[in-house]
Amino acid sequence: MGPSHPRLAFQRKMLPRFALGVLLLSVLALGCGESETSSKPLTGEERAVATALHQYVRALSFDDFKRACALTTPQARSKRRPTCIASLRRAFGAAYTPEDATSFRVRSVEVTGGRAVATTNNKDRTQTPLRKIAGSWLVGG
């Protein structure tokens, strides 16, 4: 198998992406659910909410707007025009980078029944509403 063999070319192209994916998942797993306001990490539903928001930010960071739309409530998707994907691409196209996904942290989570508000650890302490639908936490109020 010479250097131009299709399988080697594919491996050379995909191995760095795979390694980056593994690294990002490791970093997210370490940072996911960390709480700046207490010494203990988020657990249970609070952790599930933080994980859902991390997945959403990660999708935006990698320009995976289809995945990001799938992580929003049906109500939030229906408000985006002309489509959810086009709307997110226009709103967030260059706003997030893969580096943002690794540094993203949830500061706190307040869960009330099937609704939650996650506060991020950025300087503005952004609050994001989430709803639990069919057992999954989705972004949107």
Image (cartoon, rainbow, N blue to C red):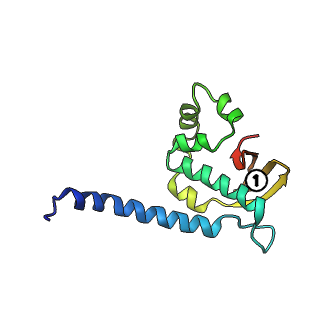
How many marks can you see?
Answer: 1
Residue ranking furthest to the top: 82
Kind of residue at disc 1: Ala
Image quadrant in which the C terminus is located: top right
- What SS does tag 1 mark? strand
Q: Residue 6: horizontal and vertical position, in percent?
A: 21, 56
Q: Residue 54: horizontal and vertical position, in percent?
A: 63, 55
- Eyeballing the image, is 63 above or below 87? below
The residue nearer to you, when weighing 32 against 11, is 11
Image quadrant in which the N terminus is located: bottom left
The residue nearer to you, when weighing 24 against 122, is 24
Task: Give the image quarter of residue 39.
Answer: bottom right
Which residue is found at the position 66% from the left and 64% from the top? 32
Task: Give the image quarter of residue 121.
Answer: bottom right
Q: Residue 31: horizontal and vertical position, in percent?
A: 64, 67
Which residue is found at the position 74% from the left and 50% from the top? 126
